Image (tube, grey):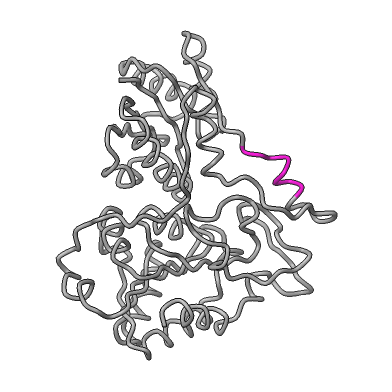
Amino acid sequence: MKRIIVTRFSAMGDVAMVASVLKEFQQQHQDTEIILVSRKLFSAFFEHIPRVKFHTFDPKHKHKGLGGIYSLFKELKTYNADFVADLHNNLRSRALGFLFKMVGYKVEILDKGRKEKAELTRATNKIKKQLKLTTERYADVFRKLGFSIQLSHLLVKEHRLIPTQYLGILASDKKKIGIAPFAQHRYKVFPLQKMEAVIQYLSSQDYETFIFGGGEKEKSIAENWSRNYPAVRNTIGEFSVSQELDIIAHLDLMISMDSSGMHMASLMGTRCLSIWGATHPFAGFLGYGQSMADCIQVEHPNRPSSAYGNKPCDCDGIEAIDLVTSDMVVNRITQICA
């Protein structure tokens, strides 16, 4: 077995994209073992991928600071790996890679394409073109290590057991739609009153609807929706990440922001209707196997303002995400699910 240490510490959507790549990599390389280094929460993404061992990265305690990175280095050295694939390219992962290089390991680092992304998102003279997909950038790291890999960019449904609580619902003939209405950055969040209008429509058409993703504040919003509209169910705080994936695997469609919900849907082979505002699929973060035809967005010269959605995007006095209407989302759902 050739053993590869793979590092991707965050964020949730990025780690899910790594899992999509590793699924295909391990199918094409039966003689490799992966040591995946990331936060404990994300271990569920890799549970069903053969020959992947998850090693927990604990940045707040055990692996905090440079001393913590050195402790992580010593832990990982015990695997006697052959290669290190840095799929993060941040200060911590580069420091870890440097330590491995110092003792003779072959280390390759993700090229994030910062220059092209800066040209895409700058305020004036934007160069608006499709950049290399992030999943292909991940694959490039393995290619530089000497491994061939051909990504299919296809959605492949993953077989998962249905959580007991939803057995009757998910096994029914009704259309089942998931909604991940929240995101880390507010400039990527479809206004909640507009999303509620979409949920109201789904409820009126007898769709089974599941709300995903968030903390206590978002859970309260989702619970309110589930009380007000029939066949709308809150999953926030009710299931583990692994169980959420079980549910997503049985959906007919996911509706998501440019966020982890889209990438979790991709990992399960579920089609996703994604809503874009300050960000743009051109930056390379479209979910693995998802289609540009399923991206709901309103083109404007000021879009996108950033690759990650952490900056406002003023489009003639309107935030970019506000250009999208509830009817645009509903009409696309109708086209897909009719």
Residue lying farthest top? 103
Place residue 278 in its image quadrant: bottom right
Residue lying farthest bottom? 204
244 left or right of 137?
A: left
Give the residue at x 84% y 56%. Answer: 124
For the C terminus, the quadrant is bottom left
Q: Is residue 145 above or below residue 265?
A: above
Secondary structure mostly seen in the magenta stretch:
helix
Place residue 81 in its image quadrant: top left
Residue lying farthest right? 125
Residue 300 falls within the magenta-colored stretch: no
The answer to whether residue 61 of the structure is visible from this angle is no
Residue 139 is situated, as x and y percent measured from the top left of the image, at: 50, 36
Q: Is residue 95 above or below residue 327?
A: above
For the N terminus, the quadrant is top left
Nearest the viewer among 267 and 62 is 267
Give the residue at x 57% y 63%. Answer: 292
Q: Which residues are magenta?
A: 112-119
Q: Is residue 127 above or below residue 328?
A: above
Q: Total label count? A: 0
Residue 128 is situated, as x and y percent measured from the top left of the image, at: 75, 55
Residue 82 is situated, as x and y percent measured from the top left of the image, at: 40, 16
212 left or right of 240?
A: right
97 left or right of 254?
A: right
Give the residue at x 67% y 72%. Answer: 298
The answer to whether residue 47 of the structure is visible from this angle is yes
258 left or right of 73?
A: right
Nearest the viewer among 140 and 163 is 140
Give the residue at x 78% y 52%. Answer: 127
Nearest the viewer among 265 and 215 is 265
Residue 49 is situated, as x and y percent measured from the top left of the image, at: 29, 41
Residue 113 falls within the magenta-colored stretch: yes
